[in-house]
Amino acid sequence: MRFVARFLAAVVLGTLIVAGGQPTGAAAAPAEVELIVLGLHPAAAARKTVALTFDDGPSKYTPQVLDILKRYHVKATFCMLGQNAGTYRKAAQRIVREGHRLCDHSWNHPDFTDLSNSAARSQVVRAQNRISAVTGRTPKVFRFPYGASNARTRIVVRNQGLRILGWTVDTRDWSRPGAKTIENRAVTGTRPGAVILMHDGGGNRSQTVAALDDVIRRLKAKGYTFVLA
């Protein structure tokens, strides 16, 4: 009930609060997760744009995601875990080479509300350094694992010169509900200026890969243009 009350209050204030995306095998997200979720700039929304974002990679599924994006000439934002950037170096480098945006998603996906300021800063900086070393590019955007943050940790992130990225459409693909369900959640939840949350890492992402082609095809048919978040 407290979460519902906070949600309703947020709607009144013009800020949407939602439960965060969660990778398979990870600890459950906190009962009360604070996430300021912003769509794209109002001018972008007026142009009927949408942004695809992928969390928890890179992984062995990332090249398949990139193949589909390349086929449709779509650019996306990849929120990387620092520990994965070195392991899947070629995929991380390909993301940059093909014109996609990098996003820091921490070193190893902790709940930031449980971290001290110094531990939170270490998670951000360590990931930044690894991603930069692997790809030659330093992310300018950060997404909190699980979407879990508070005023204190948001200050830590912003002090690193990073813009905080949320989402407006959570496909919950991490739970592997089936490719068709992922597709329908992405398409039916999208409004102009939407930011769609999907995952290219953190577990078995074969359903996400299977859904992606039709997600892009259907949104294009609705007149949406894909932009970077």
Image (cartoon, rainbow, N blue to C red):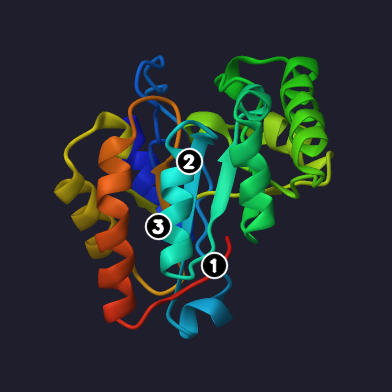
Whichever of labels 2 and 1 marks the residue nearer the N terminus, that label is: 1
Residue 104 appears in the picture as rendered: no
Q: Earlier in the sequence, mark 3 or mark 1?
A: 1
Residue sitting at x 53%, y 30%: 145
Amino acid beneath label 3: Ile
The three-letter code of the residue at mark 1 reads Leu
**Disc 2 crowd, CA 10 A, few/some/many (<14, 14-19, 20+):** many
Callout 1 crowding tier (Cα within 10 Å): few <14, some 14–19, many ≥20: many
- Going by the image, does 107 lie left or right of 34? right
Q: Tell me how far mark 3 sits from mark 1, CA to CA.
A: 23 Å
C-alpha separation, residue under disc 3 versus residue under disc 2: 10 Å
Query: Quick check: 167 left or right of 143?
Result: left
Q: Is label 3 in a helix, a strand or a loop?
A: helix
Q: What residue did someone put label 3 on?
A: 68
Residue nearest the observer in this picture, 12 or 178: 178
Whether residue 163 can be seen here: yes
Indicate the position of residue 72 as horizontal and vertical percent values.
Answer: 41, 69
Quarter location, residue 206: top left
- Label 2 belongs to which residue? 62
Q: In the picture, residue 41 is in which quadrant? A: bottom right
For label 2, the SS is helix
Report the residue marked by disc 1: 40
Q: CA distance from mark 2 to mark 1?
A: 24 Å
Residue 112, x across and y down, in percent: 61, 23
- Give the residue displayed 40% in from the left and 35% down from the top: 21
Identity, as a three-letter code, of the amino acid under mark 2: Thr
The relative height of residue 45 versus residue 147 in the rendered view (above or below) is: below
The answer to which of marks 3 and 2 sits earlier in the sequence is 2
